[in-house]
């Protein structure tokens, strides 16, 4: 009679412990995934910093080579000046023994050459001083860059969430810039191909009309509809946000803000913020939905999308998030509200201003 309730209680306690251990294991797995993502971002930032350092080193070596050439030219001008002075002294010694007119002309010519050589020497010395100042500036900027990289790496190792969020945001901006550069290059190639085709059509009989090419936004919409992997969906949503797809892209992105995967929802809100950046009236309802999401990562992306919009009143939207349960959301909202104007007459904000004030 006594063993029955005791065994039942021990079984309940054991199941509770098992459940707590499973919850702790899930938390540790999530922390491990976040740490791996932060490490990947740190590697990307370090590679970019090393590339910039290599570029600055190449520029410094080029400036040093130019400075060495300037010094060689100054030395050559000094040698020519000494030779001219010696020749002038020799001519002055034989001036009264030669014909006066020819010697006077030669003396005037030599004096002009000496004056020109002195001007060249003065210009070369000024150029050399400017190059030395430029070299000093490059060395100082290199030291500053290395110091900033070391400080950022230390902040990431300490687990500074603001530094991690800032690094993630800067990396996304740079990826967007690279995508825009690639799209610009593709557009230039297509323009060159069209010009070549027009030139050939002007001199040859018109070929049969080719099949119309679908614009890049339509290709992205079709690829998004066929994507099954969440990571592919996130990438396509971000690319659609950066493309000027108009209403078609908006209608393709909007349903993805209600999917189950939080990373896909976050990418959808970021894409909506980019597509409706200049239309605050249409963007405001989506921002309200994003900041009301249960996942903190989705809320952070929605807050950043609101900060990047033009003409959107930030205080009425973001002030309720001052007491958000996620500390990172609270930090971002606090920085945005402190940087936002106190009156609603000028609610315009940009992500670049937030990054500048955060740094």
Image (spheres, rainbow, N blue to C red):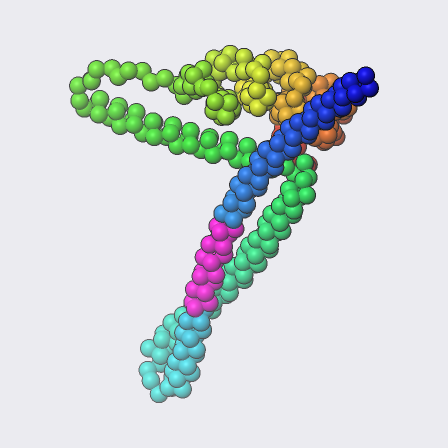
In this view, the residue farthest toward the front is 1
Q: Main secondary structure of the magenta part?
A: helix
Which residue is the extreme one toward the left? 205
Q: How many marks?
A: 0
Quadrant in the picture for the N terminus: top right
Q: Is residue 143 above or below residue 259?
A: below
Residue 89 in view of the camera: yes
Q: Camera-side residue: 335 or 294?
A: 294
User: Vertical placement of 99 versus 74: above or below?
Assistant: below
The image quarter containing residue 74 is: bottom left
Residue 97 at what x, y percent from top left?
Answer: 35, 87
Q: Residue 349: in sight, yes or no? A: no
The answer to which quarter of the image holds residue 42 is top right
Nearer-the-camera pick, 327 or 99: 327
- Which residue is painted at 67% across and 15% down in the image? 288
* Residue located 66% across and 27% down the image: 22
Q: Is residue 194 left or right of residue 61?
A: left
Q: Residue at x 49, y 47 (%)?
A: 51
The correct choice, above or below, for 100 with respect to 319 in the image is: below
**Residue at the location (46% across, 19% down)?**
228
Q: Does the stretch in magenta take in 331?
A: no
Horizontal relation, residue 69 to residue 41: left or right? left
Q: Does the segment drawn in magenta span residue 62? A: yes
Q: Quadrant of the C terminus?
A: top right
Q: Position of residue 77 (x, y in %)?
A: 43, 70
Query: Which span is picked out in magenta?
Result: 52-73
Q: Position of residue 122 (x, y in %)?
A: 50, 65
Up the image or down, 337 lies above or below 280; here it is below
Q: Position of residue 98 (x, y in %)?
A: 33, 84
């Amino acid at each position: 009679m006594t063993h029955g309730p005791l065994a039942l209680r021990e079984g309940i306690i054991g199941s509770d412990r098992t459940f707590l251990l499973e919850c702790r294991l899930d938390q540790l797995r999530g922390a491990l995934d976040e740490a791996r993502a932060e490490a990947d971002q740190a590697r990307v930032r370090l590679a970019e910093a090393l590339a910039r350092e290599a570029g600055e080193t190449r520029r410094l070596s080029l400036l040093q080579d130019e400075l060495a050439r300037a010094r060689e030219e100054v030395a050559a001008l000094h040698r020519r000046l000494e030779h001219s002075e010696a020749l002038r002294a020799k001519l002055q010694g034989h001036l009264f023994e030669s014909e006066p007119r020819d010697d006077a002309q030669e003396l005037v010519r030599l004096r002009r050459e000496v004056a020109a050589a002195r001007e060249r020497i003065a210009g070369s010395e000024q150029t050399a001083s400017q190059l030395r100042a430029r070299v000093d500036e490059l060395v100082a900027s290199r030291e500053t860059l290395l110091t900033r990289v070391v400080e950022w790496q230390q902040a990431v190792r300490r687990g500074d969430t603001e530094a991690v969020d800032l690094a993630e945001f800067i990396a996304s901006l740079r990826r967007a810039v690279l995508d825009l550069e690639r799209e610009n290059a593709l557009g230039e190639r297509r323009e060159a191909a069209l010009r070549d085709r027009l030139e050939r059509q002007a001199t040859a009989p018109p070929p049969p009309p080719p099949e119309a090419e679908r614009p890049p936004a339509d290709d992205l919409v079709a690829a998004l509809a066929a994507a099954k992997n969440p990571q592919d969906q996130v990438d396509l949503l971000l690319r659609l946000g950066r493309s000027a797809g108009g209403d078609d892209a908006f209608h393709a992105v909007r349903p993805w803000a209600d999917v189950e995967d939080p990373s896909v929802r976050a990418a959808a809100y970021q894409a909506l913020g980019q597509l409706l950046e200049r239309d605050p009236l249409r963007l405001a309802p989506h921002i309200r939905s994003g900041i009301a999401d249960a996942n903190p990562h989705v809320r952070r992306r929605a807050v950043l999308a609101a900060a990047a919009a033009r003409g959107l009143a930030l205080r009425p939207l973001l002030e309720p998030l001052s007491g958000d349960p996620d500390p990172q959301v609270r930090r971002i909202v606090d920085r945005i509200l402190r940087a936002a104007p106190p009156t609603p007459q000028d609610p315009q904000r940009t992500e670049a201003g937030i990054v500048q004030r955060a740094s």
